[in-house]
Structures are given as C-alpha cells and as structure tokens.
Image (tube, rainbow, N blue to C red):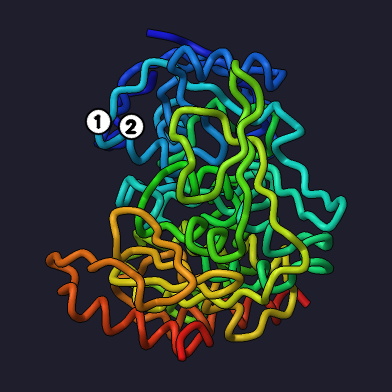
Amino acid sequence: MTAGFVSRSHRAIAPFELHRPSTIGQAIEQIAAGARPHAGGIDLLERMQQGDHVAAVADLGGLADLHRITVAAGVLQIGAAVTHAAVEGDPIIAEHRPDLADAWTTVGNVRIRRTGTVGGNLMAFDKNYDAAPILAAAGAVLVFASTEGELRTGVTDRPSSLLLTRIEVPVDGRALRFDRSLKPVVSVAVGDHIAVGCAYPAVQVVDDIDTLPEPIDDAEASATYRRRMIRVLAERLGGAP
Amino acid sequence: MSEVHVEFTLNGEPVAIDAPTEEVLLDSVRDRRGLTGSNLGCDHASCGACTVLVDGSPRASCSTFTWAVEGRDVTTIEGVGSIDRLSDVQAAFAECSALQCGYCTPGLVMTTTALLGDDAEPSEATIREWISSNLCRCTGYRMVIEAVQQAAERAR
C-alpha cells in the first residue's frame, strides 16, 4: 500500500467474513447463521462505521430474483433488492402504481436512490426512513424466506432476522400520497391506510388519526407539535376529516 | 483478516486487487492507486465529496465496499479530464467560478457528468435536484447551477 496519501476513511470498519450466495437457499442459511444481508449497503456500512459488530456479510448482489419487478393477479411484486431509482423509473410500476413511483421520488437523494434498495430501507428499522410508511399505507405484504419456509407479514409486524425477498402491493389500492417535508419530526403517508413515520419508535398504521398513540417527545420536537403536525399533514393528504 | 480478490475497470483500465473485505472504494482508489481527486468528507454517504461513477451512476465511494464494484466500470475525477484537457463539465466549472476552496468540486463534477449522461438538457429543477446530493459551503450553489447549464450547452 502506498504511503502518504492523506487520511484513510476515519471510521475504520472491523474485519468480517464475506459470503456471496448464488441461490436464495444459500443466503437463507448464511443469514440464519448470523450473516447480515448487504444489498445497496448504505445503511449497513453506516452502522458498521459506527461500530456495530458484524462477523459476516451476505452480498445479495448475485440473487437475480431479488432484483425483479413483476405484476401478476392484481399484485405488484417488487424484489427486496430493487433500488429506489428503479421504483421511481420502472415501466411496470409506472403503469400499475404511478402513485407509488411518485411517492418514491422524494426518498433520499439522486445518489442514494441509485444504490439504496427498498428492502434495505425497510429492514434498517429506522423510524425516519420512508419505505415503511409508504408501503404500510399501501397495505403492502412482505414476503420473507427462512429455513422454515416462506413467511408473509405486514410492514408493522415484520421480523428483523429473516431474508426479505419481495414486497407485494395490490394494484387496485387507493392512490398513495406522501409528505416527508417535516422529517425527522413527522412523515405521513395516506393510501388504503394512514401511516406515520418519524414520530414513533416504529411506523404507526391506522385508519383514523384520532386513534394514534402519543408521539415521541424529544429534542427534535415536542409530542404536542408532532401530534399537531400529524393532523396538518394528514388533512393535506386527504387522510383526516 | 479476510481478503477478497476484486476485479473492475478504473478509468478505462482493468484493475485487480486483493483487498480486506472491509476496505472501501475511496481508500482503494486513493491509497492503492494514488488517485487522490476523490475526497473524504463526511464519511457517511451524505456530503458527496467522494462521489465516483459506477456504471455511469454517482456513488459515495466512502460508503461502498470495494468488493461491491466487482466487474463494474468505475470512473473517478481523474478519468473525466486532465489539467491540459478539461472536460466540458470541468471547463464550465472553471469558467463560471463554480468553486472556491474546491474540496467538493470533484464530487460535483462527477454528479454533473452523470446528470448530463442521463439528461443532455436538464431543467433548472432537475439540476437542483441532482446537485442537492453534493454539499458545497463556499459557492451558495448559484454558480454551480450556472456551470451545469453551461456544461450542457458546451456538450451540445
């Protein structure tokens, strides 16, 4: 290694073992044994740079099934490793759920959208990320693969330790609208349901905003302000009377 | 230490390296190849100073494992132009004084290069959307927007 070229990245990542599964079955076994899945890698690298201990990483880049977008029997199927940019620009999504593509145009920035993935955004379990509220409002079903077989869940009850393979969105759902302009205080998505991000430890999904619990009260905003802004955004998006 | 063999194209040349799994692309191009134009800024994929192109798309090299570009085509600022032969984008940045300290400039040039590869006649709204992924604390962005517009004109 050549010396003298100023600093290396200052938050060094601890060594780890790299797996490159070529089948979903291999990936399931590696993840069951503790490997962390890597798709776009944006959130995973950030966590590793911050010191998260990761002994092994499973690179999902070789699993073509996770990168597909298809539609069948009235259901849009989005592979977990599809990038944000692909959701925004895919012709199948544009035809069947243009509202989903529109909601996605505000995720991250141009550079992040071309690397970061829908599944990575969901499985990061970050209250401020956008995929969970958008997909929860759309009534999406998440499909996981595990050594026990396939598991189907909603957004709010998704498990953290299994391999997400695809996201299913009904094509005939009510048009989605999403407002993230007040992040990280509150984000609201309205579609078949009303979903609220940022304001709770995990996304909240309701059909009536009056049934929402008390939001977080922290240095970013008070619970009172968050409660008020949830109503303002929900009203703007047509999700409140 | 776990090492991985990685082959990719760097500024048009084939590259083969054996790197620790945890090595990031920014360190590979700076330390191994001496290509110090890509800068380390925030070190968490936010500021854009380390932006390189991977298959023509902008990517934060500080937050990309080197093994993740296996088989890909990577371009750094050194592959865009040189002091003697500035690219249209570089010439426009110089012409419009779209830099002061210059630290963010390689990243902005890479983002602009990708934008013009995608959209030869970007609207101001599109330019703003793209360059919002690169932080610049000097220019206030107005000259950067003008430089992107001029680069688009130069390329036509």
Horizontal side of A197 relative to A134 (left or right) equals left
Q: Residue furthest right?
A: A73
Residue A84 at what x, y percent from top left? 61, 56
Q: Are marks 1 and 2 on the same chain?
A: yes
Residue B99, by quadrant, is: bottom left
Disc 1 chain ID: A
- Residue shown at 68%/77% (left/top)? B152
Q: Is residue B110 visible?
A: no
Q: Secondary structure at mark 2?
A: helix
Query: Who is closer to the viewer here, A96 or A7?
Result: A96
Query: Who is closer to the viewer here, A95 or A17?
Result: A95
**Identity, as a three-letter code, of the amino acid under mark 1:** Gly
Task: Work out whether B28 lies above or below A89.
Answer: above
Q: Is residue A43 visible?
A: yes
- Residue shown at 77%/60% (left/top)? A90
Local crowd at mark 2 within 10 Å, few (<14), some, or many (≥20)?
A: some
Residue identifier under label 1: A51
Task: Work out whether A25 lies above or below A36.
Answer: above
Q: Secondary structure at mark 1?
A: loop
Q: Which mark is residue A48?
A: 2
Task: Work out whether A64 lies above or below B153.
Answer: above
